[in-house]
Image (cartoon, rainbow, N blue to C red):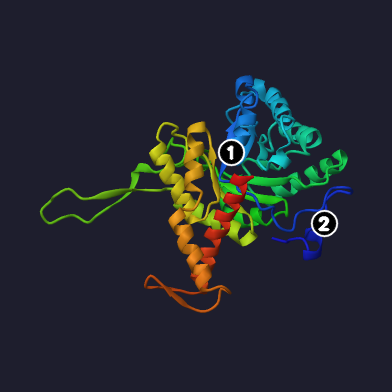
C-alpha cells in the first residue's frame, strides 16, 4: 500500500502538536500491569504498583462493565495525578475501548486533554489495518495541540484478529507514534475460529507424537504452543519497524509454572515484555524478561573479546564473530537498562 513520503513521515499531523519521536525513548518495559481503574480499592494501590512495576496500565476496555466505563476513565485521570510518572520513570498507559465502541472518542479526548502530560502510551485494541492507526494518530495530534502538550503520546496496537495478523507489517509501519504490538490470544482465537477457551499458553490437544513402536508400547508426545507462529510473525514485523513486541495475557492466574514458561518462550523469541493480570505474575515477568546473570557475564566477555564488533575470537572453545557480538550486545544493553532503572 502507499506510504507517506519519507520527508513527511515525521511531521506533526496537527498544527501545534509535538514533533513525533524519531527513535523510541529507552525504557524498561518488562511487565504491563493491568489495573481496573473504576475500583477504589485497586486504584488506591497504584502508587505502590509504580514502585514495583515497569508499566501501570489503566484498563478501559474488556473486563470493565458498560456501566463502569465512565468511572474507569475518570479513574485513569485520577491515577495520572497521583504522582509525577515522568519523573519517576514508571510508564503510565491506558487501554482505551475499541474504535467502533461508543466510548472510544471520549476515552481518547479526555485522557489526552486531561492527563496527556503524564500518559506515555495509549493501547488500541483490535487493530485490523494501518487505517485504524492513521485515524488515531491524527486525532491524538489534534488533541495534543489543543492541550498544549510538548511530548508526543505513543500508540500500542493489540494483535487480536485474523485481519490484524495478516496486516501486521503495515500496522507496525503506520505511524512514528507506534510504540509496539501485543499478542491478544483470546480475541484472536475467536477471530480464527480456534477450538480453545484458554487465554494464551499451550493446549493438551495441540501436540506432536512419535512414530509407532514395533512392540506397541506407548508413544511419547509433547504439548506444543499454538501461538508460536503468531509471536514469530509479530516479532519480525516489530523488528523491521524498530518497535517493541510484547506477549499479552496469560489467563490461568493460578498456574504460575505454565505462565513462566509461556513468558520465557516469548522472551527467547524476542518479546521485550508481557502483560500481568495479577500481582502474582509481576515477579514472574520481572525474572523472565531480565537476562540471566550468567548469560550477561558471558555476553560481556564476548564484547570485551571483540571490542569493535569485527573479527573472530574463541571463548570456552566456541567461535565468536560479528553475529554473536550483536547477540551479546542485545543482552548487555538490556541488562544495563534494567540496572539503571532498578538503581534510580
Q: Which percent across, then down, holds residue 207?
A: 33, 48
Q: Is residue 315 above or below residue 156?
A: below
Q: Nearer the viewer, mark 2 or mark 1?
A: 1
- Considering the numbered disc 1 on the image, is that residue within a helix, a strand or a loop? loop
Give the label on residue 11, or none. Answer: 2
Q: Which percent across, then down, holds residue 236?
A: 55, 59
Residue at 79% x, 47% y is 151
Q: Quadrant of residue 57?
A: top right
Q: Which percent across, then down, holds residue 70?
A: 71, 24
For mark 1, what is the residue?
53
Q: Residue furthest bottom?
A: 311
Q: Is residue 11 above or below residue 92?
A: below
Q: Is residue 337 visible?
A: yes
- In the picture, measured across the screen, residue 103 lies left or right of residue 226, that is right
Q: Which percent across, then down, holds residue 220?
A: 23, 50
- Considering the numbered disc 2 on the image, is that residue within a helix, a strand or a loop? loop
Q: Quadrant of the N terminus?
A: bottom right
Q: Earlier in the sequence, mark 2 or mark 1?
A: 2
Q: Out of 159 and 114, give the one closest to the viewer.
A: 114
Q: Out of 286 and 171, give the one closest to the viewer.
A: 286
Residue at 75% x, 36% y is 108
* CA distance separating discs 2 and 1: 33 Å
Q: Quadrant of the C terminus?
A: top right
Q: Residue furthest left?
A: 215
Disc 2 residue crowd, few under 14, some 14–19, many 20+, Cα 10 Å: some
- In the picture, measured across the screen, residue 32 lies left or right of residue 130, that is left
Q: Is residue 165 above or below residue 322?
A: above
Residue at 49% x, 63% y is 299
Amino acid at each position: 500500500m502507499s506510504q507517506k513520503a519519507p520527508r513527511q513521515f515525521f511531521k506533526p499531523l496537527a498544527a501545534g502538536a509535538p514533533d513525533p519521536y524519531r527513535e523510541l525513548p529507552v525504557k524498561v518495559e518488562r511487565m504491563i500491569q493491568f489495573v481496573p481503574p473504576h475500583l477504589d480499592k485497586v486504584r488506591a494501590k497504584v502508587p505502590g504498583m509504580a514502585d514495583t512495576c515497569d508499566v501501570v496500565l489503566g484498563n478501559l476496555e474488556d473486563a470493565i462493565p458498560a456501566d463502569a466505563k465512565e468511572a474507569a476513565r475518570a479513574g485513569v485521570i485520577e491515577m495520572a495525578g497521583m504522582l509525577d510518572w515522568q519523573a519517576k520513570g514508571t510508564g503510565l498507559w491506558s487501554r482505551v475501548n475499541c474504535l467502533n465502541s461508543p466510548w472510544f472518542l471520549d476515552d481518547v479526548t479526555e485522557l489526552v486533554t486531561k492527563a496527556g502530560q503524564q500518559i506515555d502510551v495509549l493501547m488500541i485494541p483490535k487493530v485490523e489495518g494501518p487505517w485504524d492507526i492513521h485515524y488515531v494518530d491524527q486525532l491524538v495530534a489534534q488533541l495534543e495541540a489543543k492541550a498544549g502538550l510538548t511530548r508526543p503520546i505513543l500508540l500500542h496496537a493489540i494483535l487480536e484478529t485474523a485481519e490484524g495478523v495478516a496486516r501486521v507489517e503495515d500496522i507496525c509501519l503506520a505511524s512514528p507514534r507506534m510504540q509496539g504490538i501485543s499478542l491478544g490470544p483470546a480475541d484472536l482465537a475467536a477471530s480464527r475460529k480456534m477450538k480453545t477457551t484458554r487465554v494464551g499458553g499451550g493446549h493438551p490437544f495441540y501436540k506432536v507424537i512419535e512414530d509407532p513402536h514395533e512392540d506397541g508400547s506407548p508413544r511419547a508426545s509433547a504439548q506444543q504452543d499454538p501461538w508460536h507462529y503468531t509471536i514469530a510473525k509479530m516479532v519480525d514485523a516489530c523488528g523491521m519497524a524498530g518497535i517493541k513486541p510484547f506477549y499479552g495475557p496469560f489467563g490461568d492466574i493460578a498456574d504460575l509454572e505454565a505462565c513462566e514458561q509461556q513468558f520465557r518462550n516469548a522472551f527467547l523469541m524476542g518479546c521485550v515484555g508481557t502483560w500481568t493480570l495479577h500481582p502474582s505474575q509481576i515477579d514472574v515477568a520481572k525474572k523472565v524478561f531480565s537476562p540471566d546473570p550468567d548469560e550477561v557475564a558471558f555476553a560481556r566477555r564476548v564484547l570485551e573479546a571483540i571490542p569493535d564488533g569485527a573479527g573472530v575470537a574463541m571463548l570456552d572453545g566456541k567461535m565468536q564473530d560479528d553475529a554473536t557480538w550483536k547477540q551479546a550486545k542485545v543482552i548487555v544493553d538490556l541488562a544495563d537498562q534494567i540496572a539503571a532503572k532498578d538503581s534510580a
